[in-house]
Image: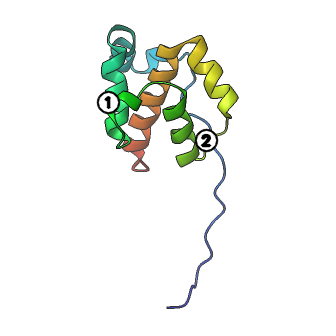
Amino acid sequence: MAVTNQPGKYEPSDFQTGLCECCDDLRVCCCGFFCLPCLGCSIARDMDECCMCGIGMPIRAVYRTRYNIRGSLCKDFYAVACCLSCATCQLKRDIKRRKEQGIF
């Protein structure tokens, strides 16, 4: 079969919500601040990873790479080191939005 269409250019994007925009989804926010391990397991389940992998810099880096989100390992480290709950909530909000858009 011959290739008739060339693949489009895949532009880098940003997270769909900011690091400190926790009020965008109060359910995720409450889960992140009152039961962070539960939120981490939810993220890991969404990404087909072990439940122990849902929180921290590695899962954030994997997600950024998978969806071509701008950033670096250094920025991931600082986001997680400064506010683990905010970084985890941001990741979950982004996953939810991508699911709603049908691109997850």
Q: Who's the residue at 53% across and 33% down the image? A: 58
Residue 19 visible? The answer is yes
Residue type highlighted by circle 2: Ile
Is 10 situated above or below 78?
below
At which x and y percent is residue 73? 66, 32
Q: Secondary structure at mark 2?
A: loop
Query: Which residue position holds label 2?
Result: 69
Q: How crowded is the residue under tag 1: few (<14 C-alpha within 10 Å), some, or many (20+)?
A: some
Q: How crowded is the residue under tag 2: few (<14 C-alpha within 10 Å), some, or many (20+)?
A: some
Q: Who's the residue at 63% across and 43% down the image? A: 13
Query: Which residue position holds label 1?
Result: 42
Q: Who's the residue at 47% across and 29% down the image? A: 91
At which x and y percent is residue 75? 67, 26
Q: Secondary structure at mark 1?
A: helix
Callout in the foreground (1, 2): 1
Residue 16 visible? The answer is no
